[in-house]
Image (cartoon, coloured by chain):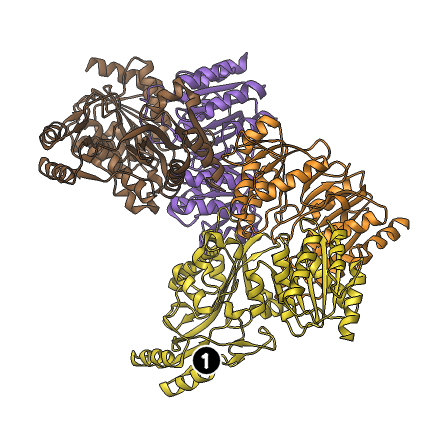
Chain colours: A yellow, B brown, C orange, D purple
Amino acid sequence: MKIHEYQAQELMRNFGIPVLDFEISDSMKSGITAADQLFSSGKKKLVIKAQVHAGGRGKAGGIAVVKNLIEAEKALDRILGMRLVNRQTGPEGKLVRKVMIVDGDTGIERELYAGIVLDRDRERPVILASAEGGVDIEETAASNPDAIATVAVDPFPGLLMFQIRYLTEKLGLTGDAARSASRVFKGLYDMFIKLDCSQAEINPLVLTHDGNLVALDAKVNLDESAFFRHPDLKELRDTHEESELEVWASENSLNYVKLDGNIGCMVNGAGLAMATMDTISLHGGMPANFLDVGGGANRETVTEAFKILLADKSVEAVLVNIFGGIVRCDRVADGIIQAAKDVHMDRPLVVRLAGTNAVEGMELLKKSGLSLKTADSLDEAAKCAVKLAIGG
Amino acid sequence: MKIHEYQAQELMRNFGIPVLDFEISDSMKSGITAADQLFSSGKKKLVIKAQVHAGGRGKAGGIAVVKNLIEAEKALDRILGMRLVNRQTGPEGKLVRKVMIVDGDTGIERELYAGIVLDRDRERPVILASAEGGVDIEETAASNPDAIATVAVDPFPGLLMFQIRYLTEKLGLTGDAARSASRVFKGLYDMFIKLDCSQAEINPLVLTHDGNLVALDAKVNLDESAFFRHPDLKELRDTHEESELEVWASENSLNYVKLDGNIGCMVNGAGLAMATMDTISLHGGMPANFLDVGGGANRETVTEAFKILLADKSVEAVLVNIFGGIVRCDRVADGIIQAAKDVHMDRPLVVRLAGTNAVEGMELLKKSGLSLKTADSLDEAAKCAVKLAIGG
Amino acid sequence: MGVLIDKNTKVVVQGITGGEGAFHTERMLEYGTRIVAGVTPGKGGTECKKVPVFNSVESAVKETAADTSVIFVPPHFATDAIYEAAYAGIKLIVCITEGIPALDMMRVKQQLKSMGVRLIGPNCPGIITPGQCKIGIMPSEIHNPGRIGIVSRSGTLTYEVIHQVTAVNMGQSTAIGIGGDPIPGMDFVDCLELFQKDSETDAVIMIGEIGGNSEEKAADYVKNNMTKPVIGFVAGKTAPPGKRMGHAGAIISGGQGTAADKISKMKKAGIIVVENLGFVGKTLVNTLEQ
Amino acid sequence: MGVLIDKNTKVVVQGITGGEGAFHTERMLEYGTRIVAGVTPGKGGTECKKVPVFNSVESAVKETAADTSVIFVPPHFATDAIYEAAYAGIKLIVCITEGIPALDMMRVKQQLKSMGVRLIGPNCPGIITPGQCKIGIMPSEIHNPGRIGIVSRSGTLTYEVIHQVTAVNMGQSTAIGIGGDPIPGMDFVDCLELFQKDSETDAVIMIGEIGGNSEEKAADYVKNNMTKPVIGFVAGKTAPPGKRMGHAGAIISGGQGTAADKISKMKKAGIIVVENLGFVGKTLVNTLEQ
């Protein structure tokens, strides 16, 4: 799960990573008050940063440096409520509801990078450090891989002093700055382990003129599977950052991802759902969504899933592909019939049922009088849906 | 390092193990005040417990149950300042300087045992649990080993839920009491690991009539080697519990243990020191002490060691056995000569030097004019010392 | 004969009295799996689906000589259940549970490795040697004893493929669902190794998906070590980068682990990659006829 | 030839610029030990006793192909130094440092085992193959190349025994001080195994002390596996129970690990136990003359 920069900074602060004091504001009024206070307390420059779940905010106009209250007001007016659009947000962009206001006069000597990620290949947390901070780490990884030092940490015995020394050395730090960096790496690792992060990043990690290190930007992704032991972290979720349909789906334990096409898909199992999308695409169509109803699908969840699918106005045809195992096809059929009763079913429907109780399911659908096409195989079903979507 | 019961209880409390509230007192006045307050607050019975580094306090008269202030005063008067003597303290006993005053009306349903120790054989912390608490666990181990459940915990992954369930089951606990026991075992293990204990014990762990668990007695031994990361634990040392000579020795980084014999020994290396004691014993003598001057022995530490040896009035002869390696024999000789100048050398001395600079050391001793016997081998030296001690 | 499990495998079900556990215990028993014990702490001494229930895996193993465990307990007890099985001497653990934190799996895997214990899953349908032993939640009726090994990161996608294999009148030696989590117990390479060695397996179907690099590692292994034909499929060609598609494993980030990358690497290694899922059965027939 | 180390062993000294490190590096160089590198963080690029100093073991190994490490760093850095050596690919680590917390050693040992790394010590004098290589702090001049293997939990006590072996005109194949800590790296059994296999070792002297049960385990090993004569000694017959005698290892508690228990078990296993330390040399002569 993604969280906001300011939330990430708060988590990091709890693990001893130095961050700047900041104010959070979700209105012009509180923003101006905060900026006024900061200027009054002697700050010469402030940075106003849009809080949305996306990187690249600067280039997209989501970050402003202001030198007085008039500039601050202008920037707040522009950023609060803007739709921040870039490659990461997709064309619809992200609505900015909150800004972070922070001292902009830290006296940057050098910009560094520190991050940690769960490496699926090595099956270890890998700490990354680079003396070239402030730029996209993936670009650095591609253009100048030697500029990035990596250390894979064994869960037991954990992060070791000699590994920290190696990372610190690669950042080109000595003396107090090196000791400060040690605390940053230790804090980053501890946070990663104790909070079940999947990724955490400080970019840039700034060395100030007076030799201090400060995390200027922070990114943390959390493992939702571990929320059972972190009830407080669960609260960091900001559903505003998700599409309405995705929130609706997750409330019903459905995995739904909105895509750009026009064929709505309902499938059980993530792998089969992806394969269904792929097959649609092979036949020249485009899926409107990924939707996995999961192993626990019953009449109720299928009904909800169906409603979510149809709520997407770009959907021109619906393809249901269920391979019954734990999920019983007759129950799925039941859910479809129920949903068709509840909502106006105005778009063509293709259903393919296989596995447990497939025959019974098909019977139910036929009896229901619903207008639909059936197919025996996935390939056939996909072909049919593509044809209907184009025709529709 | 041993610590007092009340210190152990405070540590356990920090790890979520339930202990009773208590008062500590080192004078009649504060003791009576504390008892008065406890009785006034409605307690019907109090237990007054001598705080010394020894078990078996009850049988030795160090624990009293009192029902009113008069009884409390009597008990305090008797226990504070008493010399508690039993097998564990040795014949000289332990002076009681502090007492713990605690509620004596806990309503004991059953007495259980819970402990943890670093098992050298399995090289793991081993948790012990027994439904037969309140008695010497070593006696239980001998008479009814099946009554003790043990779990060896791998440092990684640490104590696991199924292991806790096993221990709890062996205590015969269910429901809330089982959940409470889980917290006790978890707390005990966490404390053991986080504080670098070598041993920790709750005996008895009491199940009260109302179904709660309480640690009535607590024992914790700490690994002194780990004090570099536990500066607070170092402060728990009570030098009153050690003999004056042992404190003196430890201040000079010397390993000294007082024994019952009359031949003072000064040796470098613990193994050789023990072997020297053994050889003395083989020839019919009895060592007055164990004293290892260690690998870093120099003129100053040897001088101090010599003074400590001679401060023991039961010493009738002194045997010095040094095998030079890192330790240079000439420096040891120098130390002996210095010490002889500083103190009145009134007892016979046998010196055996071997290894690095042994010849030079012997030369120095001869030139010094000190009255001493020399020997080429340990066997010869021990024989000679035994003869001189009998003759002295 | 297949790999890892057969008709002599003695299974203990951890979490047998739970809804999922009880339901699938019944299905497995119907299939003929030798389920000798169940474990639910606090329910020792009772029975569930006529299987004796124990308080701990240790006592279950002591009483019944179970050698394999299948886990149906909820995610936040599942890690402990895996450890419990391993410490009790179980050598093959099948963990059905979905939603175990990734860092728990990282720790579990390090420990199991040092203990020489095999783990299938978590978040997987299980393993089946058709006609002999089914340990998991897959629908029984689609399977058919035969000589094709199946290994897959996905559940229902595997059923689809197995269905096709059966439909072309072939069968499976063993089908292993290794699960879709970022850190699975056994991986493709572990399973391919077993199938390569197994005298009852003629060819292998390997079903991958986007994310991670286990398909790439498998390709390396196939190239260097396998003589049997391998047919491959990768789901997620149309998945947009950076989006999580259900499985924790199915996420592409930083341009790595795309379907195109995987397919290209697999083809170079000599794996016959099927582009359209619907043609796995036909491709298998063509391959074995050559 | 001896075991574990010989004239080709390439040693890196961790903590080379410290007082102890520098002093003993000089002694070891004098003895002919091939010390190829030293490590002190922050002093990389300098020299100490003409040995090049590196910032990390990793860089030392990369530049000098060191295969063995000896550690002289203070106790609260020593654990990390051991891990650093192991992670850098060193396969034999000799840790002289005294005062490492017991729980640290417990963790270190679990990790080293999984990495296949051998550790001698901590809190030990080191290891020497006379005439070829000395890694540690033992006085050089008492040693003599020969065919007697020595393994001991105690430092100076070992010197005493080696001195006697040399005095009866015999020599040592290799002498290993395993150290007196409660959880040592290599134990008696590990060393006896090596000596039993070593064609250049005719007999072994094993020097134990009270506390723990490593002598008992060694006795079992000798009984079941050794054909070479083993002479044993146990220090601490007169030590009172419950008192700690210097070494963390030398403590008897709960009636276990007493000298009497150990000696009895060793005798039963066929070990020739010497009661008076002064007679080890003579006993050796008598044993080998038989």
Q: Is residue C279 left or right of residue A339?
A: right
Question: Residue D196's image quarter?
Answer: top right
Q: Does D229 appear above or below A40?
A: above
Label 1: how many Cα within 10 Å (few below 14, some 14–19, many 20+)? many
Q: Does D217 appear above or below C15?
A: above
What's the residue type where badge 1 is placed? Leu
Q: Quadrant of the N terminus of chain D?
A: top right
Chain that bears disc 1: A
Outermost bottom residue: A70
In the rendered image, residue A114, in percent from the top left (x then y), is placed at 49, 64
Question: Residue A175's image quarter?
Answer: bottom left
Can I make out residue C75 in this image? yes
What residue is rendered at 50% in x and 20% in y? D219
Q: Quadrant of the C terminus of chain D?
A: top right
Q: Is residue C46 left or right of residue A328?
A: left
What residue is rendered at 43% in x and 31% in y? B119
- Choose between D64 and C78: the one closer to the eye: C78
- Choose between A73 and D271: the one closer to the eye: A73
Q: Is residue B365 left or right of residue C270?
A: left
Which residue position is annotated with label 1? A80
Q: Does C143 appear above or below C11?
A: below
Question: Residue D9's image quarter?
Answer: top right
Can I make out residue D178 in this image? no
In the rendered image, residue B331, in percent from the top left (x then y), is placed at 29, 35
- Choose between A259 and D24: the one closer to the eye: A259
In the rendered image, residue D269, in percent from the top left (x then y), is placed at 51, 16
In the rendered image, residue C6, in percent from the top left (x then y), is placed at 73, 35
